Amino acid sequence: MPIVSKFRKRRIRLAAFLSVCGAAIVIGQAGDIRRVFGQEGKTANSETARDPADQNRSASQDKTRAPEDSRASVDPVADQDPDETKIKEPEFRRKSKPQLKRALTSIEFKVTQNADTEPAFRNRYWNNKKDGLYRCVVCGLSLFSSETKYKSGTGWPSFWAPIEEDHVGYKTDYFLFYPRTEVHCKRCSAHLGHVFDDGPTDTTGKRFCMNSAAMKFYESGKENDFDE
Protein backbone atom coordinates (compact mmCIF):
# COMPACT_ATOMS: atom_id res chain seq x y z
CA MET A 1 0.00 0.00 0.00
CA PRO A 2 1.36 3.47 -0.84
CA ILE A 3 2.57 5.60 2.07
CA VAL A 4 0.28 8.51 1.10
CA SER A 5 -2.82 6.42 1.37
CA LYS A 6 -1.74 5.18 4.80
CA PHE A 7 -1.33 8.75 6.10
CA ARG A 8 -4.70 9.74 4.58
CA LYS A 9 -6.43 6.89 6.40
CA ARG A 10 -4.76 7.84 9.67
CA ARG A 11 -5.85 11.44 9.24
CA ILE A 12 -9.40 10.33 8.58
CA ARG A 13 -9.38 8.11 11.65
CA LEU A 14 -7.86 10.90 13.76
CA ALA A 15 -10.47 13.37 12.52
CA ALA A 16 -13.22 10.93 13.31
CA PHE A 17 -11.77 10.34 16.78
CA LEU A 18 -11.53 14.07 17.44
CA SER A 19 -15.09 14.53 16.23
CA VAL A 20 -16.28 11.87 18.64
CA CYS A 21 -14.32 13.42 21.50
CA GLY A 22 -15.63 16.87 20.66
CA ALA A 23 -19.20 15.60 20.59
CA ALA A 24 -18.68 13.89 23.94
CA ILE A 25 -17.30 17.10 25.42
CA VAL A 26 -20.23 19.09 24.05
CA ILE A 27 -22.68 16.52 25.33
CA GLY A 28 -20.97 16.53 28.72
CA GLN A 29 -21.09 20.31 28.90
CA ALA A 30 -24.70 20.26 27.87
CA GLY A 31 -25.41 17.76 30.61
CA ASP A 32 -23.65 19.96 33.10
CA ILE A 33 -25.59 22.93 31.86
CA ARG A 34 -28.83 20.97 32.13
CA ARG A 35 -27.91 19.86 35.63
CA VAL A 36 -27.04 23.41 36.64
CA PHE A 37 -30.18 24.90 35.16
CA GLY A 38 -32.23 22.00 36.41
CA GLN A 39 -30.92 22.56 39.93
CA GLU A 40 -31.64 26.29 39.67
CA GLY A 41 -35.08 25.48 38.35
CA LYS A 42 -35.69 23.20 41.30
CA THR A 43 -34.45 25.88 43.68
CA ALA A 44 -36.64 28.49 42.03
CA ASN A 45 -39.59 26.13 42.10
CA SER A 46 -39.00 25.30 45.75
CA GLU A 47 -38.74 28.98 46.61
CA THR A 48 -41.89 29.65 44.62
CA ALA A 49 -43.61 26.79 46.42
CA ARG A 50 -42.61 28.24 49.75
CA ASP A 51 -43.82 31.74 48.88
CA PRO A 52 -47.52 31.15 49.75
CA ALA A 53 -46.61 29.70 53.15
CA ASP A 54 -44.19 32.53 53.81
CA GLN A 55 -46.81 35.01 52.71
CA ASN A 56 -49.37 33.39 55.00
CA ARG A 57 -46.95 33.46 57.91
CA SER A 58 -46.08 37.09 57.17
CA ALA A 59 -49.75 37.96 56.92
CA SER A 60 -50.51 36.21 60.20
CA GLN A 61 -47.60 38.00 61.85
CA ASP A 62 -48.85 41.29 60.48
CA LYS A 63 -52.30 40.51 61.83
CA THR A 64 -50.77 39.66 65.18
CA ARG A 65 -48.85 42.93 65.23
CA ALA A 66 -51.69 45.01 63.86
CA PRO A 67 -53.52 45.53 67.19
CA GLU A 68 -50.29 46.71 68.83
CA ASP A 69 -49.60 49.11 65.97
CA SER A 70 -53.17 50.37 66.06
CA ARG A 71 -53.05 50.81 69.81
CA ALA A 72 -49.77 52.69 69.52
CA SER A 73 -51.26 55.07 66.99
CA VAL A 74 -54.42 55.80 68.96
CA ASP A 75 -54.65 59.30 70.35
CA PRO A 76 -56.82 59.07 73.52
CA VAL A 77 -57.61 62.73 73.38
CA ALA A 78 -58.57 62.72 69.71
CA ASP A 79 -60.80 59.67 70.23
CA GLN A 80 -62.81 61.31 72.99
CA ASP A 81 -66.22 62.54 72.07
CA PRO A 82 -66.19 66.35 72.50
CA ASP A 83 -69.72 66.15 73.90
CA GLU A 84 -68.47 63.86 76.68
CA THR A 85 -65.72 66.25 77.84
CA LYS A 86 -67.68 69.47 77.42
CA ILE A 87 -69.30 70.88 80.55
CA LYS A 88 -73.05 70.90 80.12
CA GLU A 89 -75.54 73.08 81.93
CA PRO A 90 -78.89 71.80 83.21
CA GLU A 91 -82.12 73.42 82.15
CA PHE A 92 -83.07 76.26 84.46
CA ARG A 93 -86.49 76.52 86.00
CA ARG A 94 -86.91 79.17 88.63
CA LYS A 95 -88.42 77.87 91.87
CA SER A 96 -90.54 79.66 94.43
CA LYS A 97 -89.37 80.13 98.02
CA PRO A 98 -91.61 77.30 99.30
CA GLN A 99 -90.21 75.02 96.61
CA LEU A 100 -86.66 75.96 97.54
CA LYS A 101 -87.33 75.30 101.22
CA ARG A 102 -88.44 71.79 100.36
CA ALA A 103 -85.54 71.17 97.95
CA LEU A 104 -82.69 72.59 100.06
CA THR A 105 -81.35 71.83 103.52
CA SER A 106 -81.74 74.45 106.25
CA ILE A 107 -78.17 75.76 105.89
CA GLU A 108 -78.37 75.74 102.09
CA PHE A 109 -81.54 77.81 102.16
CA LYS A 110 -80.16 80.28 104.72
CA VAL A 111 -76.94 80.83 102.79
CA THR A 112 -78.33 81.02 99.25
CA GLN A 113 -81.59 82.88 99.98
CA ASN A 114 -80.77 84.96 103.07
CA ALA A 115 -77.03 85.57 102.45
CA ASP A 116 -76.02 83.87 105.70
CA THR A 117 -72.46 82.59 106.25
CA GLU A 118 -71.71 79.03 107.27
CA PRO A 119 -69.15 78.30 110.03
CA ALA A 120 -65.49 78.25 109.01
CA PHE A 121 -63.77 74.84 109.04
CA ARG A 122 -67.13 73.17 109.65
CA ASN A 123 -68.44 72.86 106.13
CA ARG A 124 -68.30 70.30 103.34
CA TYR A 125 -65.65 71.57 100.95
CA TRP A 126 -63.18 73.79 102.75
CA ASN A 127 -60.61 70.95 102.71
CA ASN A 128 -61.83 69.07 99.65
CA LYS A 129 -58.82 68.06 97.55
CA LYS A 130 -60.59 66.01 94.89
CA ASP A 131 -60.59 67.00 91.23
CA GLY A 132 -63.93 68.07 89.86
CA LEU A 133 -66.51 70.78 89.37
CA TYR A 134 -68.53 72.94 91.76
CA ARG A 135 -72.06 73.80 90.67
CA CYS A 136 -74.71 76.06 92.14
CA VAL A 137 -76.76 74.06 94.65
CA VAL A 138 -79.94 75.85 93.55
CA CYS A 139 -79.87 75.79 89.73
CA GLY A 140 -76.89 73.59 88.85
CA LEU A 141 -74.93 76.21 86.90
CA SER A 142 -71.18 75.46 86.80
CA LEU A 143 -69.31 77.92 89.04
CA PHE A 144 -65.79 76.81 89.98
CA SER A 145 -63.26 74.15 89.07
CA SER A 146 -60.89 72.33 91.38
CA GLU A 147 -58.11 73.63 89.11
CA THR A 148 -58.49 77.12 90.59
CA LYS A 149 -59.10 76.00 94.19
CA TYR A 150 -56.33 76.70 96.68
CA LYS A 151 -55.68 76.54 100.42
CA SER A 152 -56.37 79.99 101.83
CA GLY A 153 -56.35 79.03 105.51
CA THR A 154 -59.68 80.80 106.07
CA GLY A 155 -61.79 77.67 106.62
CA TRP A 156 -63.95 78.20 103.53
CA PRO A 157 -63.41 76.84 99.99
CA SER A 158 -61.41 79.46 98.10
CA PHE A 159 -60.78 79.91 94.39
CA TRP A 160 -58.79 82.42 92.39
CA ALA A 161 -61.24 82.52 89.47
CA PRO A 162 -64.70 81.26 88.46
CA ILE A 163 -65.00 78.71 85.68
CA GLU A 164 -66.64 81.35 83.49
CA GLU A 165 -66.69 85.05 84.31
CA ASP A 166 -70.30 85.43 83.21
CA HIS A 167 -71.46 82.61 85.50
CA VAL A 168 -71.18 84.80 88.59
CA GLY A 169 -72.52 88.24 89.44
CA TYR A 170 -71.32 90.91 91.86
CA LYS A 171 -72.78 93.56 94.07
CA THR A 172 -71.60 95.64 97.02
CA ASP A 173 -72.98 94.94 100.47
CA TYR A 174 -72.51 96.66 103.85
CA PHE A 175 -73.47 93.88 106.24
CA LEU A 176 -70.28 94.41 108.27
CA PHE A 177 -70.48 98.21 108.13
CA TYR A 178 -67.83 98.37 105.41
CA PRO A 179 -68.21 97.61 101.73
CA ARG A 180 -67.60 94.09 100.49
CA THR A 181 -68.08 92.57 97.06
CA GLU A 182 -70.77 89.94 97.26
CA VAL A 183 -70.73 87.05 94.73
CA HIS A 184 -73.90 85.33 93.54
CA CYS A 185 -74.99 82.89 90.86
CA LYS A 186 -75.61 84.89 87.73
CA ARG A 187 -78.52 82.68 86.69
CA CYS A 188 -80.61 82.19 89.84
CA SER A 189 -79.12 84.96 92.08
CA ALA A 190 -78.26 82.49 94.87
CA HIS A 191 -75.79 84.00 97.33
CA LEU A 192 -72.39 82.29 97.12
CA GLY A 193 -69.96 84.33 99.21
CA HIS A 194 -67.56 87.24 98.70
CA VAL A 195 -64.47 88.06 96.67
CA PHE A 196 -61.38 89.75 98.11
CA ASP A 197 -58.13 91.12 96.70
CA ASP A 198 -55.82 88.99 98.84
CA GLY A 199 -55.61 85.94 96.59
CA PRO A 200 -52.52 84.33 95.03
CA THR A 201 -50.35 87.00 93.41
CA ASP A 202 -49.13 84.58 90.74
CA THR A 203 -52.67 84.13 89.36
CA THR A 204 -55.49 86.70 89.51
CA GLY A 205 -54.78 88.06 92.97
CA LYS A 206 -58.44 87.32 93.85
CA ARG A 207 -59.86 85.16 96.62
CA PHE A 208 -63.36 83.93 95.92
CA CYS A 209 -64.37 82.93 99.43
CA MET A 210 -67.39 80.67 98.90
CA ASN A 211 -69.86 78.90 101.13
CA SER A 212 -69.87 75.13 100.74
CA ALA A 213 -73.62 75.15 101.36
CA ALA A 214 -74.10 77.20 98.19
CA MET A 215 -72.43 74.63 95.97
CA LYS A 216 -72.58 70.97 95.01
CA PHE A 217 -69.41 69.15 94.05
CA TYR A 218 -69.13 66.70 91.13
CA GLU A 219 -66.01 64.56 90.90
CA SER A 220 -63.90 64.53 87.76
CA GLY A 221 -65.56 62.39 85.09
CA LYS A 222 -68.99 63.00 86.56
CA GLU A 223 -69.25 66.74 86.02
CA ASN A 224 -72.38 66.33 83.92
CA ASP A 225 -74.19 63.88 86.23
CA PHE A 226 -76.41 66.63 87.60
CA ASP A 227 -79.56 64.58 87.02
CA GLU A 228 -78.55 62.03 89.65
Image (spheres, grey):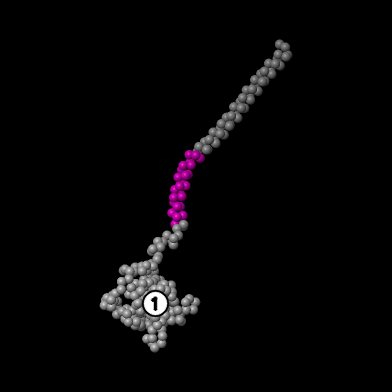
Residue 162 image point, x, y percent: 42, 74
Q: Main secondary structure of the magenta part?
A: helix
Residue indicated by mark 1: 169
- Please name the residue shown 52% across and 36% down the image: 42
- Please name the residue shown 38% across and 84% down the image: 173
Q: Residue furthest top?
A: 1
Q: Which sits in the foreground, 14 or 103?
A: 103
Q: Residue furthest bottom?
A: 177
Residue 142 image point, x, y percent: 38, 72
Q: Which sits in the foreground, 106 or 46?
A: 106
Residue 55 covered by magenta stretch: yes
Task: Judge from the rendering whether residue 139 lies leftward or rightward of residue 35; answer left or right.
Answer: left
Residues in magenta? 47-71
- Is residue 217 visible in this depiction of the protein? no
- Please name the residue shown 48% across and 76% down the image: 203
Callout 1 crowding tier (Cα within 10 Å): few <14, some 14–19, many ≥20 = some
Quadrant of the rendered structure where residue 228 is? bottom left
Residue 128 image point, x, y percent: 39, 75
Amino acid type of disc 1? Answer: Gly
Task: Judge from the rendering whether residue 62 lies leftward or rightward of residue 28; answer left or right.
Answer: left
Q: Which sits in the foreground, 214 or 164?
A: 164
Residue 194 image point, x, y percent: 40, 81
Q: Residue furthest right?
A: 3
Q: Secondary structure at mark 1?
A: strand
- Is residue 139 visible in this depiction of the protein? yes
